[in-house]
Structure formats: C-alpha cells, structure tokens
Amino acid sequence: MSERQGTTVIKGGRVVDATGERAADVLVQHGQILAVGPDLDGDAVIDAGGCIVAPGLVDLHSHLREPGKEEAETVETGARGAALGGYTAILAMPNTTPAIDSAGVVREVLELGASAPCDVHTSGAITVGRAGQQLAPMAEMAALGVRIFTDDGAGVQDNRLMRRAMEYASGLGVTLAQHCEDDALCGGGHMHEGAWSSRLGIPGQPAEAEELMVMRDIALARLTGARIHFQHLSTAGSVRMVAEAKAAGLLVTAEATPHHFTLTDACCASYDPVFKVNPPLRTDADVAAVKAALASGAIDAIATDHAPHTTEDKEQPFDEAPPGMLGLETALALALTELDLPIAQILALLSWRPAAILGIGHVHGGPVAEGAPANLCVIDPSATWVVDPVALASRSRNTPFAGRTLRGKVRHTLLHGEPVVLDGVAQR
Ligand code: DOR
C-alpha cells in the first residue's frame, strides 16, 4: 500500500490562518493535514484556484430546534446549512422543547450531531427549563463536555441567581453566555424603541433593556471573577461597556450577528416579520458602533443567531410572529460584502476567535499546518451570488436577505478530512 493512499490535495489556493497568508497546496490524509506547501500531489484533487483556504468557521450561536420543533429545523439540516456556509463546528442553543438543561437532553443532541456534516457542540441551560428560577445541573452537563451555558432566548433576570451561576461556573471552569435583555423593560415590545417604532406604531424595546443587563453582568463578573460571554450585542452602549470591561482586565468576550451589522430598524417599515428579531434591529449609529467594535476587537466573534421558523409561524402579524432569522448560510458572505476589513480579520471573527471561546481551538480554527485536524473551508472571495431562500439547506425560509447580491462563496468544506461540501454542493 502506498504511503500516500487516500490522500486529497487542495490545490492552487491561498492559505489564510492566524499565522498569516501564503500560496500553498494542502495535503490531507486520514482526517489530518499531512503537508502544506508548493506543488503537492494527492490521489484526489480539490481545486482551490483563486480561492482562500482557511480553517473551518465556528458558530457560537445556532438554534437547531431539535428536540421539539423539527418542522423548523433539525440538527442534521442545520448542520448541512452550516457546512454549506463554511462552518465545521457549531454550538446549539438550549431553547428547545424540552430545553437542553440536563445530561439526558445534552446526550440526545450530541448523538443527533454525531453523524452531521459539521461538528455539533451544545450549550446547556443556566437554569432549569430556562425559567430563571433555579440553577440547572451544570456539573453533569459539563461532564459531557458542555463548555458554554446560557438561557438564550431569555436572559437570567434574577441578580442573585446570576451571581450564584457565575460562582458555580467558575468552579466548573465553564463559561456563561448571556442573552442580555431585561424582561420588564422589553415587555410588550416587538422592535427597537425609537423614531421608527413611534412612526410605525409598533411597541418598542429600548436599547437600555440590553445595556442594563450588560452593565449588571460586568459588575457581577468583577465581583465573582467569572468568565462571561455576551451574546448578539446590538447597541453602541453595550459595545462601549464591553470594551471598558476588557480594558479593566475582566474575563469578558462578546459576539455580534451579521444582521446587527447589516440591517437597521428602518427595515421594519415593511411590517414584514422576517425583520423581527431579538435583540431587535437597531439604528444606523448602533450598526456603525458594532462594525467599529468588530474592527477594533472589542467584539471577539461574529455569531449567526441562526433562528429558523416555519413559514406558518413567521408569516403572522408583526406583533405575533416569533423573533429570529436564518444565518448560517449567509454569514460569511455578509461579512465579506459589508465589512471593510482584511480577510484574515474577518476569518478571525468567524473561525479562530470563536473556536477559542468555545474551547475547541485544538480541533477547529487552528493554523493550517502539518499534523492539524483537517477542518477546512475553501472560499471564493470574489464570487457573487443572489440569496434565494428556496435554495437554502435549512428547513425554514426566514432569511431577511432574500434577493440580495452578496460577494464571497464557500466552494468546499472539509470535516475531519472528508469533503462535506464540494463546489457548493452538500455531499451528505
Ligand atoms: O430572534 C431570536 N430568535 N432571538 C433569540 O434570542 C431567540 C431566537 C429563537 O430561538 O428564535
């Protein structure tokens, strides 16, 4: 048997990772990178001419809807969309039915993800049933590898309980992630509170509803020394506070979504619920602040908040429709199209920084180097395409970007050395 049997070479691309950029072929065998360099040969050839070869993307925020809402998405369909979007690892959110708040449900989600076309990690809920009343059994979930705990879809409202959660999480060495929203202030609101909500007659949620919780959690992180990750930050005030907390040396990280750096509350003028999301689309000034924070590093990661909803659920009147929009298949292209940043910085936000936050940097997001796991994506940075909801792999269709022309397309994705996407087509 030849030493090179079963090798695949990714040929003619430009490798971009945390160590820099270089023209190189990448040779893969048995799930690992065998060599990176010029003029490599393999049994199979994957063309990367004119493309970027990068570590696979990592999403910190995917709603996969399983168990409980399989008509909107399953772990498998969500993971397929992720692979098509260039992701090799995603983190499932716990607002399923039942919630992912025990070892049993964690095990179920991990089993569903075991055969998926990207690595599926799961978060665990901070509180039982995400009800905000009592702490969930975080230790038994951590024992199964859960590294991020969140009640996402809701923030933990009770200050004392959040303090206890931080103390408990610190002891376990895990990270708490917060959906920052003060329920009392948001109550009854369906979009950002401001000039547009007044004009449209839609009750609003003030920016302060997010910012108060960011402020509280920074104070509690200072008190407890805990690690806290802020999810989907959307306001200028939030990103300013996070930047200050980082400068003060607190263990704080943050993410922002593609929709919060591309869309504003003005979109709601259509009364189309596809633009309804939590936290809500904000103002031009907020979008500018989020973009600046992505550029400065005050926000560490782009996370999708991929939130599939069935057409039946989403096509209700604005005030009755559930919040959320699809994200996994458009995130990279939105970043490449809308952010005026070097590609290495965009990939840092989408790959190696989120991998580090999730604690999987040894498997995903790492340098493209000999001996590393072959979790890779190949991106054509100049290809343009038009978002067609019907063509998405997701079971749902609720993308606010339908009809938009985007630049940057994932050509291939390799998961543990296996091509799961080739020429933009899912292989399983
Ligand atoms: O818009 C949202 N949708 N925000 C969330 O926090 C939850 C998510 C969902 O699960 O649909």
Image: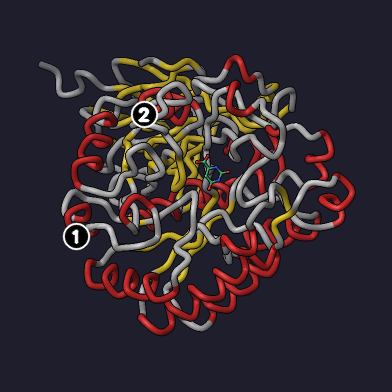
Q: Nearer the viewer, residue 57 or 155?
A: 155
Task: Let me know if residue 247 appears in the view.
Answer: yes
Q: Nearer the viewer, residue 164 or 51?
A: 164
Q: Position of residue 158 (x, y in %)?
A: 44, 70
Residue at 34% x, 53% y is: 125
Q: Nearer the viewer, residue 133 or 310?
A: 133
Side of 374 relative to 404 (left or right): left
Is the C-beta separation of discs 2 and 1 under 8 Å?
no
Which corner quadrant of the image does residue 111 belong to?
Answer: top left
Ligand 1 within 8 Å of disc 2? The answer is: no
Mark closer to the chain start, 2 or 1: 2
Q: For label 2, count other residues whose C-alpha is less than 10 Å away and answer few (under 14), some (14-19) or many (20+).
A: many
The residue furthest right is 199
Identify the mark at residue 194; answer none if there is no mark: none
In this picture, is 17 found above or below 312? below
- Residue tagged 1: 139
Whether residue 208 is situated above or below residue 257 in the rendered picture: below
* 182 horizontally vs 421: left or right: right
Q: Position of residue 363 (x, y in %)?
A: 29, 45
| Spot occupied by residue 32 in the image (x, y as percentages of width and height) | 25, 35
Residue found at x 29% / y 55%: 147
Amino acid carrying label 1: it is Ala
Q: Which residue is mark 2?
A: 75
Residue 413 in view:
no
Q: Which residue is at 38% across, 15% downward?
A: 427
- Tell me the quarter of the image containing the N terminus: top left
Q: Secondary structure at mark 2?
A: helix
Q: Residue at x 67, y 68 (%)?
A: 208
